[in-house]
Amino acid sequence: MLLIPAIDLKDGKCVRLRQGLMDDVTVFSDNPVDMATRWVDAGTKRLHLVDLNGAFEGKPVNGEVVKAIASAYPDLPIQIGGGIRDVETVQAYLDAGVQYCIIGTKAVQDPQFVIDLCEKFPGHIIVGIDAKNGMVATEGWAEDSGVSAIDLAQKFEKAGVSAIVYTDIARDGMMQGVNIDATVELAESISIPVIASGGVTNMDDIIGLCDVEHRGVTGTILGRSIYEGTIDLVAAQQYVDKRALDNQTADNGTTA
């Protein structure tokens, strides 16, 4: 299970929103690079960045901050979402050292765009599906697309998408627990790995996600929980590392 700390960027600061509402914001740091250092020191193996301004404006706004984080940690895989609507933006992020670009709104509006990106940038494209009651939301979660999350995910099954980041909007930032059932339902409907997002609150959520890893849920994004301390990232990382080692040992014993 890949634990991925989120750094949400608004006006150059590290913030968290509740249910994607730009007027319900908590500022956690004025220096996102320092926040990245905090999570790197805790042992994280990937970072999740979101350009919140970009998600609403449809173009990168916090690009310089993203570049600064990528430059500070060139060997750390970074995934970035928010306002990525053209090839030039993807190219710029990859050139800056970002490993994965997450396509959200544009994936709903123009699925062929994602297919073309996967051909041009193989192994670097993730689709972000943000849903409420199973239906995809777009434009920074402000619009209901009328498309089901499963139907959208299945459109990209053979396109070469590296993963699907599935966010349950109703749970995001609310500290109410991750929607494991909906996440597993999506994961089992496709062959693409799914990264859970939204509502991860405590170690019980992480244990629950580890229990369904074999069903296609390969990672989870951690937000408010690690900022408010309901999850200790160091302890959580140690737990998933030990669990992975135990599973590997068990597998080796079975095949020996």
Image (tube, helix red, strand yellow):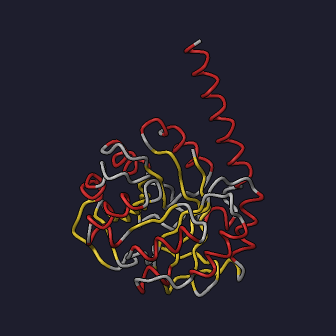
Foreground: 110 or 138? 110
82 vs 251, left or right, is: left
Q: Position of residue 165 (x, y in %)?
A: 44, 58
Residue at left offset 68%, top offset 54%: 44
The image shows residue 256, relative to residue 121, as above or below, that is above
Left or right for 212, reference 248: left
* Viewer-nearest residue: 22 or 192: 192
Whole-percent x and y of residue 83? 43, 78
Q: Is residue 1 left or right of residue 180?
A: right
- Residue 225 quadrant: bottom right
Q: Residue at x 70, y 67 (%)?
A: 36
Query: Quick one: quadrant of the N terminus?
Result: top right
x 39%, y 54%: residue: 161
Instruction: State whether residue 94 is above or below residue 156.
Output: below
Q: Is residue 12 above or below residue 74?
A: below
Q: What residue occupies the far top of the structure in this picture?
A: 256
**x, y percent for residue 88:** 43, 76
Q: Could you tell me residue 4's position as x and y percent?
A: 59, 57
In the rendered image, the quadrant that contains the C terminus is top right
